[in-house]
Amino acid sequence: MALGSPLLSHRVPKAMALMSRLSLWGQRGQIYSEEAFRHMLAIERKRAIRSSRSLLLLLVRFKGASGSRVEIPPAVSAALFSGLALCVREIDFVGWHREGRIAGAVLAQGHLMLNSHAVPRIIERVTAVLRSRLSTSEAEKLDVRVIPLGRG
């Protein structure tokens, strides 16, 4: 079916407008807004189900003194997302899981089950990269989690 066909002609511009409004950067190194991130996560979950793949949801937040989530300042979020860009592959995507509070990345996995060391290694690597880009006080508040979303 061609992009100019009557069936798709009204959908493509609408989808393109939605994605351009919802993402913060251009195609390469794209950071999705919360709405776009959740939309892309839903698409990726459906794709994983069809192909029997698993997904990992990487979440990054900063904890306050009481352990509660704190707002991520714009300067810190820039360092955070540039660090995350170093940790993900071209097929993965990053964005706001909770706007201004929790950054996320969806990591597509293969058909094989993850070994027991994969998740801790991912957390260690991401934490090390992000801490290298943050001040000491910000790095102390950093909380990185990986949630396996199961097999499709």
Image (spheres, helix red, strand yellow):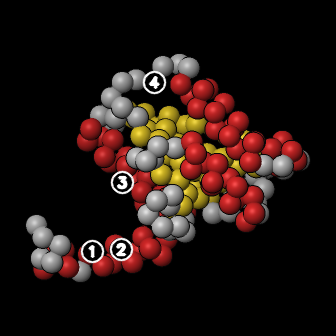
Left or right of residue 34, residue 8 in this image: left
The answer to whether any part of residue 121 appears in the image is yes
Q: Return the residue nearer the eye: 24 or 55.
A: 24
The answer to whether any part of residue 141 appears in the image is no
Which of discs 1 and 3 lies nearer the camera? The answer is 1
Which residue shows up at 50% across the image and 34% down it? Answer: 148
Categorize mark 1 by other alpha carbons within 10 Å: few (<14), some (14-19), many (20+): few
x then y, percent, for residue 17: 39, 78
Which residue shows up at 63% across the image and 63% down it? Answer: 99
Which of discs 2 and 3 lies nearer the camera? The answer is 2
**Mark found first going from the N terminus, 1 or 4:** 1
Identify the residue under disc 4: 114
In the rendered structure, are the residues bearing label 1 and label 4 in contact, judged by CB atoms less than 8 Å apart? no
Q: CA distance from mark 1 to mark 2?
A: 6 Å
**Mark found first going from the N terminus, 2 or 3:** 2
In the rendered structure, are the residues bearing label 4 and label 2 in contact, judged by CB atoms less than 8 Å apart? no
Dot label at residue 43: 3
Amino acid type of the residue that numbered disc 4 sits on in the rendered structure: Leu
Identify the residue under disc 2: 16
Left or right of residue 104, residue 50 in this image: left
Q: Is residue 137 above or below residue 10?
A: above
Left or right of residue 36, residue 134 in this image: right
Q: CA distance from mark 4 to mark 2?
A: 34 Å
Q: Is residue 46 above or below residue 18?
A: above
- SS type, badge 3: helix
- SS type, badge 4: loop
In the rendered structure, are the residues bearing label 1 and label 2 in contact, judged by CB atoms less than 8 Å apart? yes
From the image, which quarter does the N terminus lie in? bottom left
Dot label at residue 12: 1
Q: CA distance from mark 1 to mark 4?
A: 36 Å
